[in-house]
Image (cartoon, rainbow, N blue to C red):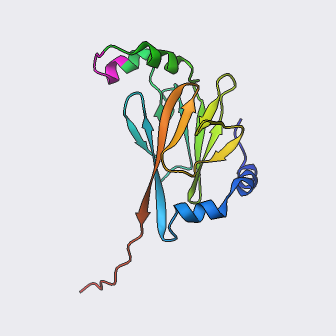
Amino acid sequence: MGLTEEELRRKYEILKHPQTKEDIYLPDSSPKLTIKDMQTEREFIFPDDRQIITIGRDPECYIHVPSEKDLEEILMGKKINPEIAKRVRRVEEKHANILKYFNDFLIHNLSAEYETFLNDERVEELQIIYKNDSKIRLGDYELLAKFCLMRQIKTNITPQ
């Protein structure tokens, strides 16, 4: 079940930690979030034109966790580690959302059966991804969140 914008705003205000935020974001920067799939080494960049992305096994998800068959293709015929195959089975079709709210990114668990963790803490409702190299676990499937700060460059060049 999705949150309304007002519910999201209220939860965000409760979770916000200004002293931490100042340590992470530079005032003239716009953060980019990259999610790395630790099983396949694929990387996904949170798109600028979206507010929410979904992670799960459903092929429509922005971050699509591959099925066992898809894993074989991604890993180019290499033998799949049985442990990775087990991890894939514990990810639901639509397992979690990552939301962009101003310059913050938040994770929201959608799974009823398997849990979502952020840095080994269970995501109850909505949690801010505030650290670089944050570990996200969907069941046992591991992802890594990395921030890249994009400085806005101001120039004083006048056209001729």
Residue at 27% over, 84% down: 159
Residue at 54% over, 51% down: 131
The answer to whether residue 47 shows anywhere in this view is no
Residue 132, horizontal then vertical, whole percent = 49, 50
The answer to whether residue 108 shows anywhere in this view is yes
Residue at 38% over, 28% down: 40
The residue nearer to you, when weighing 33 against 160, is: 33
Image quadrant in which the N terminus is located: top right
The image shows a total of numbered marks equal to: 0
Q: Quadrant of residue 93?
A: top right
Residue 38, horizontal then vertical, whole percent = 42, 32
Q: Quadrant of residue 157?
A: bottom left
Q: Quadrant of residue 150?
A: bottom left
Residue 120, horizontal then vertical, whole percent = 60, 36
| Extent of the magenta region | 72-78
* Residue 63 is one of the magenta-drawn residues: no
Residue at 47% over, 66% down: 29
Against 32, residue 59 (above or below) is above
Image quadrant in which the C terminus is located: bottom left
